[in-house]
Image (cartoon, rainbow, N blue to C red):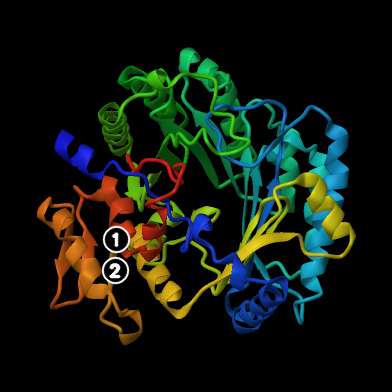
Amino acid sequence: MNMNLLDKYNVRGPRYTSFPTVPHWDDKNFSLKKWKNEIKNTFVNYNDDEGISLYIHLPFCEQMCTFCGCHKRITRRHDMEMPYITAVLTEWNLYLEILPKKPIIKELHLGGGTPTFFSPENLSFLITSLLKTAIVPKNKHFSFEGHPNNTTREHLQTLYNIGFRRVSFGVQDYNPIVQKAIHRVQSFESVKQVSDMAREIGYTSVGHDIIFGLPFQTQKHIEKTMAYTEEVKPDRIAFYSYAHVPWIKGNGQRGFLEKDIPNALEKRAQYVLGKKHLEQMGYQEIGMDHFALPEDSLIKAAENKLLHRNFMGYTSSKTHLMIGLGVSSISDSWTAFAQNTKSIEEYQELVKEGIIPVAKGHILSEKDEVIRKHILAIMCQLETSWAAENLEFENLPLVLDSLTGMENDGLLQIDRKAQKLSITEKGRPFVRNACMAFDFYLDDDKNAEKPIFSKCI
């Protein structure tokens, strides 16, 4: 890859799992009362047609992985499982009090932390208790994240019996030196065994998460990881850049030195090499950093321009309302966002007192909603259009002018007559940069004392 392009575009920027991004939420104009109204209105407008999505954050891990930027609690105390589950179910009941009728749960995802830290019995109790209060359609999408070292056949069978059909395992890299640095040691044999077990039981989608740009990682490591990946042939692969953000409180990224991290050119070379191997195996690239086999539902959704992206990642099932349960979870009513408190103790105390444990949020303005649609279209379809009247906005000409450099570099095409912007194949690695041109909140970051986002490359 052209080093000049890397130098030019390797700036800090959001991954755009939402817009506005969390650091730019306007908490002053947000309140729990407003949030409840937004939830109710979106539910009334969309539940009957598309249902809702649920994300449940299960924060416990037995050990710290030093690449991880998620909210977690490191502990070996499994007696914490049931009090936490009780709190999650209590929070869900607080949301049910807002909703005028039984919700249709179209999509459900367990994330963490490590969901398989919890025993199969406790996970079964959590999910079955929750589903008793809702309508579950036949075309549901239930998924969870599993740790290869502690996901048992009982975990897989129990969740399968409840309706889960998709599981993703965090692989990261197979090299022992890299694994030791990120404190995530697991053998290829354990990954293959748990992946094979999932398929034997009947899971229709097994995914692997692989990271490039990790400390001590080289192109030879990518070669090895891809060779092992071909042996298992997961249905989906998230192949994404390590985000080095050690300044975030509670982040475990301290197990290595800055000099141990590959530079931008090496990181991009690792990605290009990995992508080449994935394409040779038959995978197709989706949006940003995701790959799937041709028969996967994500590929079909992308082909039909129905691919959606939310806080759970890329999905073929779009819902306007996503409720996040558990500590630090983020909810999305399409017109507003809300995030729960990050303290487990405070979270449990608030729900015990009958209070939805929201710590901050944002009510989207009309301009926010328009920009969100553009960024979502770029992230999912690699294109956007402002031909429809409701997709124009005041400073659109300035945004397009600011993208002239990317256009001249062959990274995107702007058709002003057709009122359309498209990312080129060459521009795929710079999708975040294109989205940033639309993000009018970024001007507020110029005088920040500490970095807010990781680098784009």
Is any part of residue 4 visible from this angle?
yes
On the rendered image, what quadrant is the N terminus found in? top left
Q: Is residue 443 above or below residue 391?
A: above
Give the amino acid at mark 2: Thr
Q: From the image, tell me which residue sits under label 2.
A: 384
Task: Classify mark 2: helix, strand or loop.
Answer: strand
Mark 1 vs 2: CB contact within 8 A = no
Residue at left 66%, top 54%?
Answer: 329
Q: Nearer the viewer, residue 286 or 414?
A: 414
Against 50, residue 390 (above or below) is: below
| CA neighbours of label 1 inside 10 A, class few (<14), some (14 to 19), many (20+) | some
Few, some or many C-alpha atoms within 10 Å of disc 2 (few <14, some 14-19, many ≥20)?
A: many
Q: Which mark is residue 45?
A: none
Per the model, the C-alpha gap separating discs 1 and 2 is 13 Å
Residue topped by disc 1 = 437
Q: Residue furthest left?
A: 408
